[in-house]
């Protein structure tokens, strides 16, 4: 992973860390989880549609049809819905920490299905990052069990999608798949937009700003940036963004939501960065 790719990971982690904060604020403003995720996807799809239409002139819709549907469900509609429900009882820091199970799940899937992908450096990096994750969470935890399970299921969905995207044929464009999957996700969730249509008038202007930022910046922009990385640096390295998300999310929670971040959590942050280093060491050695 070069400096440009690592910088992109950091940018995506900040954007996704912010999405958990917006989810929490929207829930506090009285919006329902499915209302949030359906409007989020609708706004994201409206924003990405012109770029998708331009891409259709270059890439085959037939080749990308199945990935649109699969990734639209596994990487947008399903995890976004589950995380929105989890936001009812979990803070932004806790939500992003639970999402950080993605690298472990990705490694388990990848090493099981593709033996050639296994390396001790990648495994060490994942385990060091996991240790940093536990340091951030702390031994007491106090997480709601049901909400935590929803987050882990969402993380598994992300992991499966990441492994699939890393193995797409060269004729396929991951950025095109990302754009199409956002539109598919919006279509899947569109019925809930109509279901909650009678509550549209009660949404405050502040909440609309949160929804717009969540859909356009935290979803469309971050998603396309990330999905292009997967093929370049591999699913495990790319999934390390979810180790970085808790760091940015917790700091955003401190700034805007009053969450606490004791000094000893710095150790967990440093371990996460060390894990990223080890996971990429093998790749550098192979060149």
Image: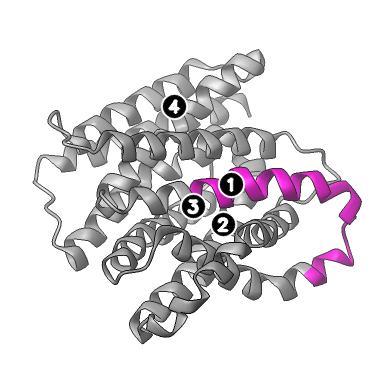
Percent position of residue 242, x then y: 41, 43
Placement of 141 over or under 46, stated as above or below: above
Q: In front: 145, or 163?
A: 145
Q: Which residue is mark 2?
A: 223
| Residue 221 visible to an observer of this rendering | no
Q: Which residue is mark 4?
A: 104
Q: Is residue 84 left or right of residue 57?
A: left
Q: Is residue 149 left or right of residue 171?
A: left
Q: What is the chief secondary structure element of the magenta stretch? A: helix
The alpha-carbon separation of the residues under discs 3 and 1 comes to 8 Å
First in residue order: circle 1 vs circle 2:
1
The residue under the point 68% across, 62% down is 183
Question: Mark 3 near mark 2, Cβ–Cβ under 8 Å?
Answer: no
The alpha-carbon separation of the residues under discs 3 and 2 comes to 12 Å
First in residue order: circle 3 vs circle 1:
1
Placement of 74 over or under 133, stated as above or below: below
* Neighbours of disc 1 within 10 Å: few (<14), some (14-19), many (20+): many
């Amino acid at each position: 992973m070069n400096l440009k790719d690592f910088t992109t990971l950091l940018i995506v982690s900040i954007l996704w860390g912010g999405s958990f904060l917006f989810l929490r604020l929207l829930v506090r403003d009285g919006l329902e989880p499915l209302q949030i995720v359906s409007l989020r996807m609708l706004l994201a799809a409206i924003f990405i549609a012109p770029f998708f239409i331009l891409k259709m002139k270059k890439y085959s819709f037939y080749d990308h049809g199945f990935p649109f549907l699969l990734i639209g469900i596994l990487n947008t509609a399903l995890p976004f819905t589950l995380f929105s429900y989890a936001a009812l009882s979990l803070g932004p820091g806790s939500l992003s920490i639970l999402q950080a199970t993605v690298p472990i799940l990705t490694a388990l899937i990848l090493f099981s299905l593709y033996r050639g992908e296994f390396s001790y450096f990648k495994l060490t990096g994942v385990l060091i990052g996991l240790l940093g994750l536990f340091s951030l969470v702390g031994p007491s935890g106090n997480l709601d069990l049901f909400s935590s399970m929803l987050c882990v299921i969402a993380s598994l969905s992300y992991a499966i999608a990441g492994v699939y995207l890393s193995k797409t044929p060269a004729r396929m464009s991951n950025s095109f798949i990302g754009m199409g999957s956002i539109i598919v996700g919006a279509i899947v969730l569109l019925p809930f937009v109509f279901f909650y249509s009678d509550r549209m008038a009660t949404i405050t202007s502040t909440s609309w700003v949160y929804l717009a930022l969540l859909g356009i910046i935290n979803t469309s922009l971050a998603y396309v940036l990330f999905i292009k990385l997967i093929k370049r640096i591999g699913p495990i390295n790319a999934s390390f963004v979810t180790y970085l998300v808790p760091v940015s999310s917790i700091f955003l929670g401190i700034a805007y939501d009053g969450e606490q971040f004791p000094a000893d959590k710095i150790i967990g942050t440093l371990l996460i960065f060390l894990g990223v280093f080890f996971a990429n060491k093998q790749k550098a050695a192979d060149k």
